[in-house]
Image (spheres, rainbow, N blue to C red):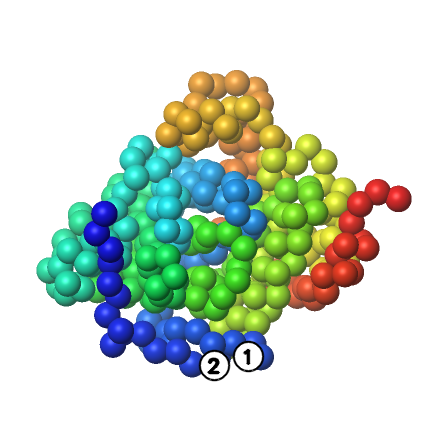
Amino acid sequence: MSTVTVPLSTLRVRPTDGEGSVQVAMDPNLKIGAAKVFAVYGKGGIGKSTTSSNLSVAFSKLGKRVLQIGCDPKHDSTFTLTKKLMPTVIDVLATVDFHTEELQTDDFVYRGYNGVMCVEAGGPPAGTGCGGYVVGQTVKLLKEHHLLEDTDVVIFDVLGDVVCGGFAAPLQHADRALIVTANDFDSIFAMNRIVAAIQAKSKNYKVRLGGVIANRSAATDQIDRFNDRVGLKTMACFPDLDVIRRSRLKKATLFEMEPSPELAAVQQEYLRLAQLLWDGTEPLVAQPMIDREIFDLLGFD
């Protein structure tokens, strides 16, 4: 397998958001435009891609022009929409030695179910680069090809736990950050770290916390306890249904699966969430907890 070499001349680091932060410097003039932009975060494996893809379809069902950008080296964010693993932006750029003018739109943008436009940003080779560079190059390429001008909604589906400024780069473009979590300690612990990352980014960018999406959760008592403590709200709740697991195996969104009463309820919840986000939500101001506080807070008495 060939490796992708990112030109060093394009990488710059600087201290920016939050005390001690060092990351790739983003072009301050690189803005998405008039679209409403949402960044979806959460613990690895919590269902962010499933949530993002079905939310994208829900927006499209409301008549919106939607672009979903996967920000994970696995480049599997959009495969239920496109029915295949798409090449990443970085891989495509490497084929033309990073000369963006040689690319056509069809080289890196694919039309998915119900017209959702799909892009997989991918990531740098393991241990060799910064995810922030990848996100920046993707947005730059989309703007150069005028693909953001007629878009109503952009959804960034971001890989798991936030551990560096680079993978928090989508927050520099987003209006609202949404956190997907389950009703368990590990998911909520990751959510607390994400809250801290969003808080740091909000000092210099327009992004604000939109709310929490409970996933694979019959109950939400632990999520509710955490939300009440830090200042968050749950916007939607999706149960742990087998039809959701099967939809991933069938490479299909939930809006393409065999109808059933329980599936109809999930579809309606996605449509309700999409409408809520489109209408606009008040920003949430949350105060993350220290690790020991979360440990003491969660659990049963």
Residue at position x 51%, y 52% from top?
Answer: 160
Residue neighbourhood size for the residue with mark 1, other residues' Cα within 10 Å, grouped as few (<14), some (14–19), many (≥20)? few
Residue lying at 37% horizontally and 42% vertically, measured from the top left: 76
Real-space CA distance between mark 1 and mark 2, rounded to the nearest whole angstrom: 7 Å
Disc 1 marks which amino acid? Answer: Gly
Which residue is the site of mark 2? Answer: 15
Q: Earlier in the sequence, mark 1 or mark 2?
A: 2
Please give the label number shown on residue 83: none
Is residue 35 visible in the rendered image? The answer is: yes
Q: Is any part of residue 62 visible from this angle?
A: no
Counting from the top left corner in percent of width and height, residue 291 is at 72, 61
Task: Confirm or deny contact between disc 1 and disc 2 (CB under 8 A).
Answer: yes
| Mark 2 surroundings: few (<14), some (14-19) or many (≥20) residues within 10 A | few
Residue of label 1: 20
Residue 21, image x and y in percent? 52, 76
Q: Quadrant of residue 124?
A: bottom left
Residue shown at 43% from the left, 58% from the top: 37
> Which of 284 and 62 lies nearest the eye of the viewer?
284
Q: Quadrant of the C terminus?
A: top right
Q: Position of residue 178 (x, y in %)?
A: 55, 53
Name the side, left or right, on which 223 lies relative to 121. Answer: right
Q: Quick one: 128 or 223, which is closer to the camera?
A: 128
Horizontal and vertical percent for residue 74?
A: 37, 46
SS at badge 2: strand
Residue type, label 2? Pro
Q: Is residue 214 above or below residue 195?
A: above
- Residue 103 or 132: which is nearer the viewer? 132
